[in-house]
Image (cartoon, helix red, strand yellow):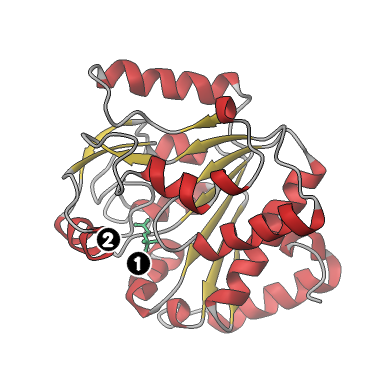
Amino acid sequence: MLVIIQPNKDLASLQAAKLVAAHVRRKPNSVLGLSTGNTPLGTYTELIRMHREEGLDFSSVTTFNLDEYFGLSREHTQSFYTHIHKNFLDHVNVRPDRAHIPNGESRDVDETCSRYEAAIVEAGGIDLQILGIGRTGHIGFNEPTSSLASRTRLKTLSDETISDNSKISGEIPEVAITMGIGTILEAKKILLLAFGGAKANAVARAIEGPISSSCSASALQMHRDVRFILDEEAATELRHRSYYDRVVAQTMKYAPELLGGTND
Ligand code: PGA
């Protein structure tokens, strides 16, 4: 696990974008796991800039979104379908038939969820999964007490999540289709981004707390290739902060590619 703390969210987003871009350049047919919410927006903006100005090519990339509200049409302004198109997919050259988002209007949820899992396997598995974290410690919509082995399924949102997400986008459904924790843990690499003081407690529980379904992000401690990219505020409750900084300094010296390249 690498815990990378940047002075602010803009620098953190740039670093995340560098890591994603390096992955896509190394493996043009990468399978990317995308998340929505506010946190990855700066990363998507930088990836769009790299696509426009530096020729970063997504034409062979496949994407799978983490989750989608249940009961909203794709065109609904609050759907994650709309969110990811508006903020990323409409501005890069991912082929529409390779961009996967759970169907929030499905009439057969079990079938939709198992087909989503099968499509991930058919694509070769997720190479790089981008994640945010909720105040509850959720990844995707895996709210506290979600099974650490869970797969894509319908989940009821917690009170905190409904309150946080309604502040961003108005009234939202109380249920969503989400990849499970077991699904997420199968991604080959994971990048979790967290910004702001409201996330500090969840971040500390995820990185330093016991592995527990009370904080679904703590399951990432079992993953062998995960990077947390934080701003200063999200890092304030970490007890081993100075150690993480030393690890990053040594990594920059001996294996800068693990951090997205040199810090120029
Ligand atoms: P946010 O949501 O990026 O809007 O804070 C993150 C999450 O709930 O996973």
Q: Is residue 4 visible?
A: no
Residue 253: image location, x then y, percent: 84, 73
Residue 95: image location, x then y, percent: 62, 31
Q: Quarter of the image holding residue 133?
A: bottom left
Give the residue type at disc 1. Answer: Ala
User: Is residue 228 shown above or below 31?
Assistant: below
User: Is residue 193 shown above or below 195?
Assistant: above
Q: Quarter of the image holding residue 245?
A: bottom right
Q: Nearer the viewer, residue 94 or 130?
A: 94
Residue, disc 1? 202
Q: What is the CA distance from the residue labelled 2 to the residue labelled 1?
A: 6 Å
Q: Nearer the viewer, residue 141 or 163?
A: 163
Residue 161: image location, x then y, percent: 23, 57
Q: Is mark 1 within 8 Å of ligand 1?
A: no
Residue plotted at (36% across, 71% down): 199
Figure quarter occupied by ligand 1: bottom left
Residue plotted at (48% across, 18% down): 118
Element class at badge 2: loop
Q: Nearer the viewer, residue 179 or 169?
A: 169
Please state, as top left, top right, bottom left or bottom right, where the C terminus lies in the image: bottom right
Residue 136: image tag: 2
Element class at badge 1: helix
Please state, as top left, top right, bottom left or bottom right, where the N terminus lies in the image: bottom right
Q: Is residue 261 left or right of residue 196?
A: right
